[in-house]
Structure formats: structure tokens, C-alpha cells
Image (cartoon, grey):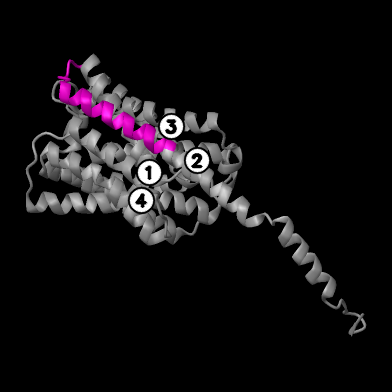
């Protein structure tokens, strides 16, 4: 984390966000072709995520072996706890998508922003300015307008959505706190958590996917096409950049910023869906996207204003006025200086 902060600059910050948005949008488009009925009908989302982390773990292993990155110490129990929460997030998200309507699924994803805010306040005593709070509200309204359609709720779906929101929020907060706690870089932390997540997801994934889709991945592999293999490899390659950029963005900023500015991906996905896949883009969608973008701009301004205000306050606290300096000087002159070797006052 300390290395990340030292090397952090506006250019590298923009690069981290750009990498996350481009890789995330790219992986959504690749997965749409891979998993849709009109594409390659690969309906094994949890197992595919296991492939993603396996490739990410391989990249981390090669990077550490060649000396490009150093392996930093993080207690195993912390890594296991984090991996359990992260895998719970993935599984619960998949169940939520299966059991709920698309509208309620989108609402549950939007609720992560206020949930992350509340959890950071509870866990880290973090407070937010009025401007930041209002900008979050604007983003939530904008994304809600352009994505939420039919809303149907059932007990199982609601429970899965709650677990997904809480687990995902906790996982994203933990990414930043672990980097800070152990002074470990984003990629170093990812290279430690990825193998654990890969193994657990590849073991449990096929069973979860069978429950969700009713299909066995072993049957699919028997008749897999070269096109499906190409898109699986493309999805895994993009996942490496997506995972790295997620850890970078949360480590440099916060889980709240990642959630708020991350909704730019939603805007990009809707736009590219309209351009590439002839998806319908209504006036409601366009207005919602404009409101969301406005909210993101306001949020960025509010965060920067908050940082500037914090710096001014810190500088004021550490700067003494001329009057305070004179009083301090007079006080020091009136205090007897003790000679510690002789034990006497001069």
C-alpha cells in the first residue's frame, strides 16, 4: 500500500480506472457471447470465475518467480477469511441473478453504495461530507432510472440478494484494509488470494452451476468448440486486468469510490450493447445515464474538495502562529534546564 501511494500520480490513477472500465466492459461483452444461447451457451458462470482466478494466480506466480514482484507476508487466516467472503459474494450474486427479476437484481447492486458507506462508518469510523452523500444519491437515481425495469421479489431471492450485497461490500472494503494493514501492494495481495479462490471455485463451481443451470460442465467439455475455447481464454485474459485494476483502484481510493465511479461501466455496457448488439436504448436510458454521469462528476469534485479541506485543516493544526511561538519561547526560557548527568538544575 505504501508503495502504491508513493508511486500514485494523476496519470497512474486515471490509468487504473481506465484499465478497470475497459477490462470490465470487455469481459462483459466476451461473456455475453460465450454464455448466451445465440453464442456458445457456456452456462457455467461460477466455474468460469474459477478459471479467471486460476489464470490470475498463474500470472502472479510467474511474476513472483521472475522477481518482477515480491511476495509479501499476509497471515494465512486473513487470506482464508477474505477468500471465503469473496467466494460467498460470487455465489450469492449468481443465485440472486437466477432467483430475482433483472430489476430487483439491479436494485440490489445499487444498494451496495449506501451499504459500503455504512459499513465503512461502522468498521473504520469513516465520515462523509454532505456533498459526497448527495452525489451518491444522484448516481444511484441515475443508474436506477437507466437500468431498473420490472421488480419482482421473492423470499429466497431477497435472502440471496442480501447475502450478495453484504459479502461484496465487505470484500471490497477488506481489499483496501488488508493493503493498508500489511503494507502490501495491490498485485501482491491479489497473487496471494487468487490461488485460494481458484481452487475453491473450481471444486465447488461445477456443483453450483449444475444447481443453477441444470447442466454438467463435463457434458459441455465433450463437445466444446474452438470458438468457445477462444472466448474462454479471452475472458480469462481480461479477468486478470479486471482483478488487478480492482485491487489498484480500491487500494488507492476507497470501496465507495470504486462503487460510485464503477457505474461508468454500466453506462458503457448499455451504450456498447446498443452499438454492437442492437439493444434498445430509450429516452429513459439516456436520461438516466446523463444523471448518473453528472452524479459521478459531482462525486469526484466532492471527494477532491474533501481532500483539500482535510489538508488545510491538517496544516492549520500543525502550524503555530507568531503569538503562540512567542509564548512557547517565553515558557521555555522560564523553565530550569536540568543537567541529567549531574542531577542538578542550572
Q: Earlier in the sequence, mark 1 or mark 2?
A: 2
Residue at the spot 19% in from the left edge and 39% down from the top edge: 106
Decide whether the magenta segment is chiefly helix, strand or loop.
helix
**Dot in front, 1 or 2:** 1
Which mark, by number, is residue 131?
Answer: 1
> Which stretch is magenta?
277-301
Q: Earlier in the sequence, mark 1 or mark 3?
A: 3
**Dot in front, 4 or 2:** 4
**On the rendered structure, is 102 left or right of 165?**
left
Residue at the spot 33% in from the left edge and 37% down from the top edge: 51
Can residue 30 be seen at all in this image of the molecule? no
**On the rendered structure, is 145 left or right of 251?**
left
Quarter of the image with the C terminus is: bottom right
**Dots 3 and 2: beta carbons under 8 Å?**
no
In the figure, residue 283 lies in which quadrant? top left
Residue at the spot 21% in from the left edge and 25% down from the top edge: 287
Amino acid at each position: 500500500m505504501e508503495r502504491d501511494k508513493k508511486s500514485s500520480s494523476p496519470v497512474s490513477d486515471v490509468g487504473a480506472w481506465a484499465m478497470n472500465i475497459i477490462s470490465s466492459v470487455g469481459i462483459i461483452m466476451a461473456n455475453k457471447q460465450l454464455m448466451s444461447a445465440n453464442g456458445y451457451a457456456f452456462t457455467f458462470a461460477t466455474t468460469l470465475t474459477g478459471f479467471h482466478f486460476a489464470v490470475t494466480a498463474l500470472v502472479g506466480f510467474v511474476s513472483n518467480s521472475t522477481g518482477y514482484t515480491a511476495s509479501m507476508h499476509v497471515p494465512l487466516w486473513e487470506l482464508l477469511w477474505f477468500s471465503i467472503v469473496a467466494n460467498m459474494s460470487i455465489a450469492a450474486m449468481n443465485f440472486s441473478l437466477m432467483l430475482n427479476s433483472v430489476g430487483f437484481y439491479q436494485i440490489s447492486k445499487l444498494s451496495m453504495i449506501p451499504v459500503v458507506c455504512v459499513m465503512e462508518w461502522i468498521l473504520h469510523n469513516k465520515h462523509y461530507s454532505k456533498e459526497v452523500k448527495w452525489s451518491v444519491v444522484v448516481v444511484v437515481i441515475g443508474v436506477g432510472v437507466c437500468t431498473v425495469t420490472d421488480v419482482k421479489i421473492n423470499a429466497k431471492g431477497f435472502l440471496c440478494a442480501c447475502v450478495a450485497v453484504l459479502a461484496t461490500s465487505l470484500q471490497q472494503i477488506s481489499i483496501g484494509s488488508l493493503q493498508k494493514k500489511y503494507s502490501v501492494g495491490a498485485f501482491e495481495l491479489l497473487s496471494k488470494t487468487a490461488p485460494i479462490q481458484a481452487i475453491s471455485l473450481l471444486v465447488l463451481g461445477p456443483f453450483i452451476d449444475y444447481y443453477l443451470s441444470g447442466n454438467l460442465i463435463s457434458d459441455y467439455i465433450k463437445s466444446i468448440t474452438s470458438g468457445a475455447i477462444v472466448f474462454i481464454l479471452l475472458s480469462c485474459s481480461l479477468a486478470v486486468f479486471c482483478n488487478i485494476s480492482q485491487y489498484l483502484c480500491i487500494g488507492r481510493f476507497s470501496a465507495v469510490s470504486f462503487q460510485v465511479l464503477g457505474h461508468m461501466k454500466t453506462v458503457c455496457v448499455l451504450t456498447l450493447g446498443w452499438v454492437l448488439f442492437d439493444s434498445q436504448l430509450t429516452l429513459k436510458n439516456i436520461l438516466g445515464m446523463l444523471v448518473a454521469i453528472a452524479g459521478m462528476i459531482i462525486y469526484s469534485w466532492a471527494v477532491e474538495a474533501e481532500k483539500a479541506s482535510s489538508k488545510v485543516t491538517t496544516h492549520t493544526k500543525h502550524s503555530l502562529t507568531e503569538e503562540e511561538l512567542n509564548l512557547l519561547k517565553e515558557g521555555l526560557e522560564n523553565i530550569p534546564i536540568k543537567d541529567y548527568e549531574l542531577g542538578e538544575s542550572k
